[in-house]
Image (cartoon, coloured by chain):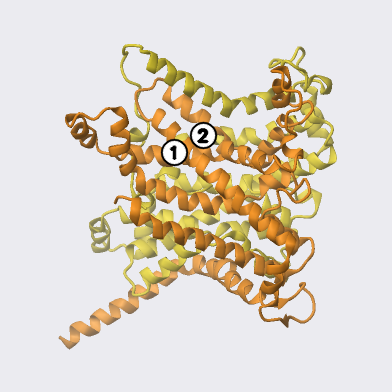
Amino acid sequence: MNIATGTKTEAAIYTPAPKARKISIKQILKYLAIIIVSLMMVLPFVWMLSASLKAESEIFGFPIKWIPETLHWSNYKDVWTKVPFHIYYLNTLKIAVITTILVIINSSLAGYAFAKIKFPESNRLFFIYIATMMIPYQVMMIPQFMLMKELGLVNSHWSLILLGAFNPFGVFLFRQFFISIPDELLEAARIDGLNEFGIYWRIILPLSKPAIATLVIFSFMHSWNDFLGPLIYLTSDHLYTLQLGIQHFITEYNTEYALLMAAAVSAIVPTIIVYFLAQDHFIKGVANTGIKG
Amino acid sequence: MKQKRRSSSTTIRRNRLVAYTFLLPNIIGFLLFILIPVIASFFMSFTSWNGFGVIEFVGIENYKNLLHDANFRISFINSILFTLISVPVTLFLSILIAIALNRGIRFVKVFRTAVFLPYVTATIAVAAVWQLIFNPTMGPINGTLMKLGIDAPPGWLSSPSWALVSVSVVYIWHSVGYYMILFLAGLQNIPDHLYEAAELDGAGPIAKFFNVTLPSLSPVIFFTMIIGVINSFKVFDLIYVLTGGGPGRSTHVLVYDIYNTAFKQFEYGYASAMAYVLFLLILIFSFIQFKGQKKWVNY
């Protein structure tokens, strides 16, 4: 399980392209294979984008017309007016942002305790945290629901925010990162009269921007893309998240494929933008922790 | 001496107090939303309860019923089949792609992004697209096949014999980038001197692959096998949107059944028992892999 703790720099993950070299048949075949694989990964997105701009009757035309004759931007207008998409957007954004802030605060505090304070139960407690990461969500799903029902939080965004805010992964990520910060630094700060919280707040957190960035991206993406949680907890249309909204769209308007594709494009654009902005953190995060977003 | 011991025990007490203050918010959430629910559902699996009224203890009745539940058996088998199809193919493809994209390639960032892109996009949106791509009469896949002269291509998602495979295809497409990143990190960790030593011994590219790359990568392969199995047992979103478990019961998997039993039929006790069977299944798969690793994993 090296990978869980190993650290890797950005530079090492992105090896630069080599200088010009002789072109051999082997090289050509290699490029050909890579291009085919990449196309297979990307073509569904291109198809989706192209279908979202077509007239309904054009979608299944054969051979596939990748660029529609006339661009039907009205599909997007229709989606956003037929379905309260802006409300779904705001709901999803609200849940994702609040969850992410709570995750960062409580995970970094707990990670600090596990990494930098020596107390007798430290390792045992941390082991319990790690062990629960193996347990499938389905095992805790029902009692969680009962609890939320007791708290009156079913059909409220807070059930999703609270459940998303506490995950052992965040604690794990911060602990691993904090351990790599030398203890001497903390000792020096203690001699200077900083208390534990001061050390955490003024020394450790400013040094932990990479870990914070990684967790922000993961937590945000995870909330944004979550489907099962909203499916269980949200029943009123005005509380729906994007994923639930799309699913709703699939069942309601299942013959209007062009609109469906416009809805799907609208839903994934933000995550793709976040991904491109924070690509390196994202990839480093996966590589270092094996987190499944 | 006495003085010193007292001061060390006060240090422990002080540290403990500080540690738990830091841990407090997280521990409350962890207990309330993770640990207690895990334990509670274990007890619930021995009851017949629908969320209302008295909780009736029924012993191992739920588990006994599961043994004779034909629908549960189908889901159980489907879950295992899905894992056996998708995990090996995903890992095999992602190793190949990682090796191809490791070094000596131009535009490497573009290619890696292309492979990784499906993983960051929401499964719901992606499933909606694949549903159309797989459309048996009009979709681009069967359109192409029919153009190529195949008169009766499979119905993919609407064919009982092809549905599970089709879902696996989408799943593999969606997750291959994630495993590729893990393998890339593993490949970058292999020290160059191992390859240089192999070259001195006269090893060609194939010998280098089998004698250096694979053995050095074995811990990563082991790790990805473990999480790959866990993840593939948990596939829900894709199946919910792509097939809804159908046609018939051909794509019903355990997590899908657990959701339906709990939140559509409100049989909480029975659903909890199913969840624990799923957990047990994951533990068994992990245990087998841990036992087997001694034979092939190099640390």
Amino acid type at mark 1: Ile
Amino acid type at mark 2: Phe
- The answer to which quarter of the image holds residue A48 is top right
The percent position of residue A212, horizontal first and vertical second, equals 44, 48
The chain carrying label 2 is B
Rendered residue at 71%/15% (across/down): A65
- The answer to which quarter of the image holds residue A61 is top right
Of labels 2 and 1, earlier in sequence is 2
Q: Tell me which chain appears orange.
A: B
Residue that sits furthest to the left in the current view:
B1
**Residue closest to the eye, A293 or B176:** B176
- Calculate the distance from the C-alpha at mark 2 to the C-alpha at mark 1: 8 Å
| Residue A87 visible from this viewpoint | no
**What residue does disc 2 label?**
B116
Q: Tell me which chain appears yellow.
A: A
**What residue does disc 1 label?**
B181
B22 relative to A20, above or below:
below
Rendered residue at 34%/79% (across/down): B13
| Residue A93 visible from this viewpoint | yes
B63 relative to B226, above or below:
below
Q: Is residue A289 left or right of residue A264?
A: left
- Give the label on residue A202, or none: none
Q: Secondary structure at mark 2?
A: helix
C-beta proximity under 8 Å, tags 2 and 1: yes
- Classify 10 Å Cα crowding around label 1: few (below 14), some (14-19), many (20 and above): many
Residue that sits furthest to the bottom in the current view:
B2
